[in-house]
Image: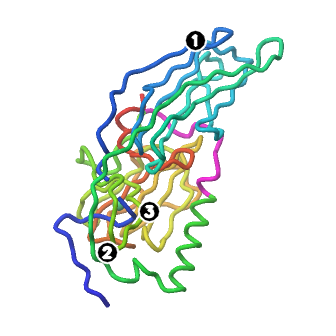
């Protein structure tokens, strides 16, 4: 077995960068027809970033649909009687830089279809490159291991394809470890044993094995098992296409189907799966977009 070179700073090899420089975030608004106003937290975003979107002036009887870059995304009303609706636009870590559109559609009182859109500029993130040497089985899995990887991927796709039309979160998202203020490695590009791999999709927190890991927000546990690359893994559905993932745990303390509250203990930090040392890998997916989870903690009101 090839010797694993341990880094001084441990990190997980789920793939990638420290989030790139943020573009200036200035809220923008647009008045559409029939009293509808659109707001976005910014007209620009970096790869792996997040935009908060709002529709106001909506009658309770009006139904809205939204699209982000041509794909339908969920919108939800603040309360059943509110004139305000919200959406989150996730910018995938590898979304090509360019101009995209957030579009909403609804019907006027006379049934006439109406639409309004907002342009959004996506900029390249600035992600460092890291070169690592790991056990060969994690770069070139054998056919049996590869089969397992594909089964894991299928399972994750089925989870992320499911949009629970319900707000399962309450209040602010929190960091999944106590006593930490930030994490790192989001988006980092990895070169494993000389071969370029997909980028690192989560935020890593260095911590000793056995440190308790907490749910970043309330929701429903949709996966609690050992996966090939991410080791012991928990995935929580927070509703409307928002999922958080906790990887490399030494122990899982949750079951599929559990309803969890914010800060409920769901496992312990470990070094299972493809890792160079114990740490927590924390991922956030919004409508399939792999986004920097720290932004959700910092920016969701
Ligand atoms: Zn990681």
Q: Left or right: 54 with respect to 277? A: right
Image vertical order of residue 292 relative to residue 269, above or below: above
Residue range of the region highlighted in magenta in the rendering:
159-171
Q: Quadrant of ligand 1?
A: bottom left
* Residue under the image location 23 percent in, 47 percent down: 179
**Nearer to us in this view, 14 or 129:** 129
- Residue at image position (70%, 25%) is 105
Q: Which residue is mark 1?
A: 31
Q: How many neighbours does mark 3 have within 10 angstroms: few (below 14), some (14-19), or many (20 or more)? A: some
Question: In the image, which disc is placed on residue 253?
Answer: 3
Between label 2 and label 3, give the one nearer the viewer: 2
Above or below, comparing residue 297 to residue 11 in the picture: above
Which quadrant of the structure image shows residue 128?
bottom left
Q: Earlier in the sequence, mark 2 or mark 1?
A: 1
- Residue 56: where, in percent of width, then height? 58, 16
Q: Which residue is mark 2?
A: 194
The residue carrying pointer 2 sits among few (fewer than 14), some (14 to 19) or many (20 or more) residues within 10 Å by Cα, namely: few
Question: Quick check: 121 above or below 127?
Answer: above
**Residue 168 falls inside the magenta stretch:** yes
């Amino acid at each position: 077995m090839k010797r694993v070179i341990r880094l001084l700073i441990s990190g997980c090899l789920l793939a990638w960068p420290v989030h790139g420089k943020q573009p200036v975030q200035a809220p923008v608004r647009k008045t559409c027809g029939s009293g509808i106003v659109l707001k976005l937290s910014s007209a620009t975003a970096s790869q792996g970033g997040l935009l908060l979107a709002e529709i106001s002036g909506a009658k309770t009887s009006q139904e809205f649909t939204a699209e982000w870059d041509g794909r339908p995304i969920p919108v939800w009303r603040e309360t059943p009687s509110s004139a305000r609706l919200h959406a989150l636009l996730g910018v995938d870590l590898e979304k090509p830089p360019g101009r995209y559109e957030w579009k909403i559609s609804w019907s006027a009182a006379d049934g006439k279809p109406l639409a309004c859109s907002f342009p959004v500029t996506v900029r390249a993130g600035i992600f460092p490159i890291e070169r690592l040497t790991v056990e060969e089985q994690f770069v070139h899995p054998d056919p049996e291991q590869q089969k397992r990887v594909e089964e894991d991927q299928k399972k994750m796709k089925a989870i992320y394809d499911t949009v629970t039309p319900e707000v399962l979160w309450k209040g602010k998202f929190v960091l999944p470890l106590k006593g930490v203020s930030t994490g790192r490695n989001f988006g980092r590009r990895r070169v494993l044993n000389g071969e370029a791999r997909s980028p690192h999709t989560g935020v890593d927190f260095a911590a000793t094995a056995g440190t308790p890991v907490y749910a970043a927000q309330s929701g429903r546990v949709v996966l609690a098992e050992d996966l090939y690359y991410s080791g012991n893994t928990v995935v929580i559905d927070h509703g409307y296409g928002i999922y958080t993932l906790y990887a490399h745990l030494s122990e899982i303390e949750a079951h599929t189907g559990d309803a969890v509250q914010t800060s409920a203990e769901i496992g312990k930090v470990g070094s299972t799966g493809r890792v160079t040392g114990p740490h927590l890998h924390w991922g956030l997916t919004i409508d399939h977009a792999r986004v920097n989870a720290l932004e959700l903690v910092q920016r969701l009101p």
